[in-house]
Amino acid sequence: MEPELATKIENADLPAELKTALTDLAQSVDVLAPQLPAGPSRRIRYFLGQLIAEVTDATVDTHWWESTCDFIVKTAQDRGASGQAAVAAVRKLQPILHQQLGPYDQVTLREITADTVFRICLLSDTLTEPKKYFVAPNAISLAQAHFNKYAWFRAIYAGKAPVGFMMIVDDPDKPEYFLWRLMIAEPFHGRGYGRQAIQCLVEYVKTRPNATELLVSCGQGEGSPEEFYVKQGFVSTGKIEDGELVLRMSLV
C-alpha cells in the first residue's frame, strides 16, 4: 500500500473494523494491480485512492465509492486467487461503508462539472448485457448535447453519490418535451432512484413553457426499460420511431 494511503487510514477517526477493511482492500489491490493491463491497473489504483479519501476526509462532498467497488469487482473477476481476494475485500467493506457514509436516499438532479464529468461518463461502464445496449454511453450523450441547443442534461444524485445521467430535449416552442436519455448505474439498480429521477424531471418540465406532455422512446426485447416507463405513468402511443416504441406522459 502507498505510504500516503496507509497514513490516511491510520490517522482517520474511523471504527477499527472499517480501518481493517480498508487496509485489506488496499493490500488486495496492491497484489492485483500488477497483473492487470496498464489502463485498468492505473485506474484501479486511482479509484482506490479516491475511495479512501471519501472515507477519511469529511470535507469530500461527492461519493463515488460504490461505483469504485463495482469497478474493482468487475475488473477482478476471473483473475485467479488475487482477484478473488479483491472481490472478498470489497464485499466485506461495502456494508460498513453504507453504515458509515449513508444514507443515500434523497434524489436530486445536478449540473455536471469539470470535477465530475469524467466519472459521470464512467458510470456507463457499470452497465452489463443486455441493459447496456438500451442506452448510449454518457460520454456519447454529452457529446451530442454539445451540438444540440435544446439539450438539457443533469447528473442524477442520491445524497452525495452520483448514480446516473438524464438528458431531455427542452424546446420551449413545442408542447411536448422528450426524455432523450436516462441511465442509472448498475450498482444502484432496484433502489427507486430512477423513479425519483423521473419525478424530479416531471417537476422541472412542468415549469417550462407550453409543456403538456413528456415523451420517451425505448427499444424492445430483453433488458428493455419499457416496463419501467409504464410503471412511472407513461403510456404507449403505438408509434415506432427509429426502431423504438414511443410512450407519452400527460402533464396536464
Image (spheres, rainbow, N blue to C red):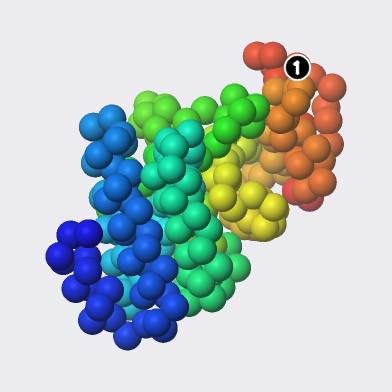
Of residues 188 and 175, which is closer to you in this image?
188
Residue lying farthest to the left in this orientation: 3
Q: Is residue 187 shown above or below 25?
A: above
Along the line of sight, the residue nearer the viewer: 249 or 133: 133
Residue 252, given in percent of the width and then of the height, sits at 78, 50
Q: Nearer the viewer, residue 2 or 152?
A: 2
Vertical comparison of 218 with 17: above or below: above
Q: Position of residue 173 (x, y in %)?
A: 57, 35
Give the position of the N terminus as an image quadrant. bottom left
Q: Is residue 236 visible?
A: yes
Find residue 200 and report its image quarter: bottom right
Q: Please tell me in which quadrant of the rendered image residue 243 appears.
A: top right
* Residue at horizontal 37 percent and vertical 59 percent from the top: 25
Relative placement, left or right, of 142 versus 7 is right
| x 65%, y 27%: residue | 130
Q: Position of residue 94 (x, y in %)?
A: 51, 63
Res 66 seen here? no
Q: Name the secondary structure under disc 1.
A: strand
Disc 1 marks which residue? 240
At x 69%, y 40%, the residue is: 214
Residue 112 shown left or right of residue 49 in the figure = right
**Picture coordinates of residue 60, whole percent (x, y):** 31, 70
Badge 1 density bin: few <14, some 14–19, many ≥20, Cα 10 Å? some
Q: Residue at x 35, y 53 (%)?
A: 28
The three-letter amino acid code for the residue at tag 1 is: Ile
